[in-house]
Image: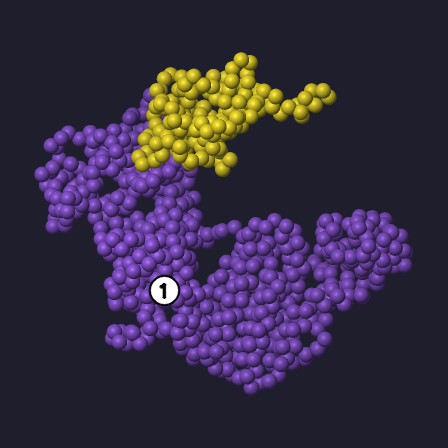
Chain colours: A yellow, B purple
């Protein structure tokens, strides 16, 4: 009975923690379709600069964007830890996100998530909360704004 | 009987019959004495009526019935066809079309009785036929018929159970019961209007009855009663050994029952009741009406049963607001046979590969290749056949245009003729469904803006009747549809002036614009050159809609025009949507696919053969000057070609324009499956029309050569 009550009061969500540069970001696990290793990306000419190209995921062509470029950071450097996270948006279209490293899965509940303090910094528009996991802070990505076409670069 | 399963067929056939009617009426208008045509029309109208009746669409049935009567009189030579009559008949066709649309959307024909049209049809019969009784009698007949269903409901203080239609099984049960000395009663139970839980009360009634005997059938059905889909009464047939008073008492013992009426049924009467359902409530028994109503009478009993059933189904289905009908393709059984054969071959090919893999040691490498080749030929054929199954002639879209032009001709008061060729040209079903509107826009455009007024035509020495042509034909991997008129053509000066007036372009820009660029302005949203906004065209929504629609289908629109002589609009559409033959090329270190359909030839060109015209690179190939496009520049990659070596130039064609694409290397021809690039990636130049996955899992992009030209 008690356990039920707790579950009802504090809704908890699982996040995949990724690393871009020195910062840690969280992506809601329910949006994630797949995580694949870096593979050869086919460049597409004349597209938004943050799109690295397209890859083949199980016979489907999926566009891949660089989170770094989207956030206005320097160009990716592909290492053995680089991963592509395939996310499915609400409209069921897939997009791949290139990240420096995938670290772990954490469970955060409402108590450990803070609202973002809005200021004029550009990349904060992609974040809809800050989660606290022990000592570390995890910026929670708002996938819909990340994926959408609003071009800040 | 569930008529839903027939709905698709009904709609298909209704379409066909309406089309026949429309075509034949057009012929009839020009040749009023053509007997074959009259017979054809009569047959189509008759079948349509029968079908509407069977499906329980009464209003549709009534309207076709009256049309049929007119045709019947025409056929007997009692009425002459004239313009007025054809107009009325066309209106009737439109009304039928409306019913059909309603039915396909929500399985209901709607509530429009179209009385003016029915009256007009009867006026034609009255006015010209000379045999006064027939139409008068018909009027009587058709009017009450329309009311038949409601009046039976409303006036049903007694014998409401008589409306229940008995089918074979129920009839059988009843006759069995009578044999066993049981009694069969009909009851109509009225629930108090203040009752809140009607369904519960009805359920209690059923429960009470079941203790005494057996309910054979109820109206509405038990299911609908449970779902509370009835007003405040329901009727039922009941088999029991108890006397009727006891049964009534049992029913009335349920609270909130207002009253109940009932009587013994004898089987003969019940049967009659079922069959006479249609005619009995008619106040005026018309003895002479047998002649005109003969066809109706034969369909009436058949109609009665589904009519009631379909009513229930409507109630159920109407809750979801989805269109009731799936899109279908009628497939020639032969095409399916071919498919079946190919699939069996595919299975054989797979099996031989499996056996090959299991005794690997014994097999040779050439045997493996053989199997692969076999598999390849099977899959190619399979692809072709599947595409063929999806292909339908554009006929289904274009054959409504003669009628449209006829109406436009009257509305605009211009004489015009439409000539069509290539209606049999086939396109993918999804494309055919979409091209109707754009073509209609173009035709209306030609009729309204293109063709000049009569005075101007005479002045220019053209014939009085404006000519509009619609030609369709296949051209390589494309289907071309041309809409041509011999009218005024596009006045580029007027377009330019208008654009400057609207601020779309500045006067300076106007000075330097080429004719083609000016014509392109017409495709901008909200640009119309018509001085007066007519309801035919001229709202400026036409051409940009045409372009975007055709664009979304992977095609394009172009126009050629000569002032004073006419214009030609050309729509090019891809034949297939999913799989194409492509040439794989290398540019820099990237692989691209170019649709084989647009490729004319491949040339080996030396660097020094390139000439310059207006600072653009061209080559002179067999006396044709062809502009050169260096793909490495366009795509932004470093060319991997050795300097000074010969270039590989792919000559591509769009309409009658050519261009040469310089690539680094050819890989070869390949069948590729077109995939979309995904939703979020946005190729601004539209240069990349899609992507495909190569044998090694790598993704290659598909170049749209049409954009480059």
Residue drawn at 53 percent across, 66 percent down: B96
Residue position for label 1 = B530
Residue A97 position (above or below residue B688): above
Report the side of B392 relative to B114 (left or right): left
- Chain letter of disc 1 in the image: B
In the displayed image of the protein, which residue is found farthest to the top? Answer: A135
Q: Quadrant of residue B269?
A: bottom right
Q: Position of residue B165 (x, y in %)?
A: 71, 61
Q: Position of residue A67 (x, y in %)?
A: 41, 26
Query: Which residue of the protein is positioned furthest toward the front in this rendering?
Result: A119
Q: Nearer the viewer, residue A91 or B181?
A: A91
Examine the rendered structure and indicate whether residue B95 appears above or below residue B560.
below
Label 1: state its secondary structure: loop
Query: Is B610 on the left-hand or right-hand side of B281?
Result: left
Given residues B279 and B469, the one toward you in this image is B469
Task: Left or right? Give the position of B671 relative to B141.
Answer: left
> Which one is in front, B592 or B336?
B592
The correct choice, above or below, for B451 with respect to B308 in the image is below
Q: Residue pushed farthest bottom?
A: B130
On the image, which quarter does residue B264 sit in?
bottom right
Q: Residue at x 85, y 53 (%)?
A: B256
The answer to which of B166 and B667 lies nearer the viewer is B667
- Is residue B222 visible in the rendered structure shown here? no
Residue placed furthest toward the left? B608
Residue in view at x 25 percent, y 37 percent: B634
Q: Quadrant of the N terminus of chain B?
A: bottom right
Q: Position of residue B631 (x, y in %)?
A: 23, 37
Residue B577: x percent and y percent?
37, 45
Residue B207 in view, yes or no: yes
The residue shown at (83%, 61%) is: B262
């Amino acid at each position: 009975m008690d356990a039920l009550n707790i579950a009802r009061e504090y809704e908890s969500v699982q996040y995949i923690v990724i690393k871009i540069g020195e910062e840690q970001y969280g992506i809601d696990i329910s949006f994630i379709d797949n995580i694949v290793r870096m593979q050869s990306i086919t460049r597409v000419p004349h597209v938004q600069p943050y799109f690295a190209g397209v890859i083949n995921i199980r016979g489907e062509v999926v566009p891949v964007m660089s989170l770094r470029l989207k956030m206005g950071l320097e160009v990716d450097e592909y290492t053995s830890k680089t991963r592509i996270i395939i996310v499915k948006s609400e409209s069921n279209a897939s997009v791949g996100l290139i990240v420096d490293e995938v670290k772990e899965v954490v469970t955060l509940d409402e108590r450990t998530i803070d609202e973002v303090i809005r200021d004029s910094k550009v990349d904060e528009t992609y974040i809809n909360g800050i989660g606290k996991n022990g000592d570390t802070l995890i910026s929670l990505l708002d996938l819909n704004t990340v994926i959408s076409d609003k071009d800040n670069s | 009987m569930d008529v839903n399963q027939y709905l698709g067929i009904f709609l298909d056939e209704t379409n066909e019959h309406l089309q026949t009617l429309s075509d034949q009426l057009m012929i009839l208008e020009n040749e009023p004495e053509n007997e074959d045509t009259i017979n054809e029309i009569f047959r189509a109208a008759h079948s349509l009526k029968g079908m509407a009746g069977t499906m329980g669409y009464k209003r549709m049935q009534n309207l076709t019935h009256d049309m049929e009567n007119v045709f019947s009189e025409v056929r007997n030579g009692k009425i002459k066809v004239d313009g007025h009559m054809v107009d009325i008949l066309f209106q009737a066709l439109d009304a039928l079309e409306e019913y059909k649309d309603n039915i396909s959307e929500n399985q209901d024909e709607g509530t429009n009785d179209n009385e003016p049209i029915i009256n007009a049809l009867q006026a034609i019969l009255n006015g010209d036929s000379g045999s006064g009784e027939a139409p008068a009698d018909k009027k009587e007949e058709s009017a009450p018929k329309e009311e038949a269903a409601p009046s039976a409901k409303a006036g049903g203080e007694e014998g409401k159970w008589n409306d229940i239609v008995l089918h074979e099984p129920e009839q059988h049960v009843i006759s069995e019961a009578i044999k066993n000395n049981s009694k069969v009663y009909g009851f109509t139970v009225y629930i108090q209007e203040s009752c809140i839980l009607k369904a519960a009360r009805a359920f209690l009634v059923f429960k009470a009855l079941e203790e005494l005997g057996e309910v054979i059938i109820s109206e509405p059905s038990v299911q609908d009663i449970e779902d509370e889909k009835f007003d405040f009464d329901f009727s039922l047939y009941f088999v029991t050994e108890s006397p009727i008073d006891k049964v009534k008492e049992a029913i009335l013992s349920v609270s909130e029952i207002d009253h109940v009426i009932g009587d013994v049924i004898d089987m003969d009467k019940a049967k009659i009741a079922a069959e006479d359902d249609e005619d009995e409530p008619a106040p005026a028994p018309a003895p002479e009406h047998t002649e005109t109503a003969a066809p109706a009478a034969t369909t009436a009993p058949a109609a009665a049963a589904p009519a009631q059933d379909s009513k229930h189904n409507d109630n159920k289905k109407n809750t979801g607001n989805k269109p009731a009908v799936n899109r279908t393709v009628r497939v020639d059984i032969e095409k399916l046979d071919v498919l079946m054969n190919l699939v069996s071959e595919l299975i054989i090919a797979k099996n031989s590969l499996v056996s090959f893999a299991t005794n690997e040691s014994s097999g040779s490498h050439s045997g493996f290749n053989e199997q692969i080749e076999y598999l390849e030929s099977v899959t190619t054929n399979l692809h072709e056949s599947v595409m063929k199954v999806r292909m339908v002639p554009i006929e289904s879209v274009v054959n409504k245009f003669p009628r449209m032009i006829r109406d436009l001709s009257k509305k605009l008061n211009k004489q015009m003729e439409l000539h069509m060729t290539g209606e049999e040209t086939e396109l993918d079903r999804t494309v055919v469904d979409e091209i109707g509107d754009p073509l209609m826009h173009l035709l209306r455009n030609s009729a309204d803006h293109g063709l000049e007024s009569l005075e101007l035509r005479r002045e220019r020495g053209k014939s009085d009747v404006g000519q509009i042509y619609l030609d369709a034909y296949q051209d390589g991997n494309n289907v071309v549809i041309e809409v041509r008129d011999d009218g005024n053509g596009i006045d580029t000066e007027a377009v330019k002036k208008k654009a400057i007036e609207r601020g779309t372009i500045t006067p300076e820009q106007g000075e330097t614009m080429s004719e083609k660029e000016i014509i392109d302005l017409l495709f901008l949203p909200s640009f119309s050159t018509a001085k007066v906004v007519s309801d035919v065209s001229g709202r400026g929504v036409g051409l940009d809609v045409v372009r975007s629609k055709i664009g979304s289908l992977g095609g394009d629109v172009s126009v050629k025009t000569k002032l004073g002589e006419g214009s030609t609009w050309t729509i090019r559409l891809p034949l297939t949507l999913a799989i194409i033959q492509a040439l794989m090329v290398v540019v820099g270190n990237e692989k691209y696919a170019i649709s084989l359909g647009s490729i004319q030839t491949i040339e080996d060109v030396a660097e020094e053969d390139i000439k310059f015209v207006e600072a653009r690179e061209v080559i002179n190939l067999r006396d044709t000057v062809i502009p050169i496009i260096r793909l490495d520049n366009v795509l932004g990659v470093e060319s991997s070609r050795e300097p000074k070596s010969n270039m590989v130039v792919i000559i591509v064609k769009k309409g009658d324009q050519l261009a040469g694409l310089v690539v680094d290397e050819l890989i070869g021809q390949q069948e590729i499956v077109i995939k979309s690039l995904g939703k979020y990636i946005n190729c601004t130049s539209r240069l990349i029309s899609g992507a495909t996955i190569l044998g090694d899992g790598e993704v290659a992009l598909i170049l749209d050569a049409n954009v480059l030209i």
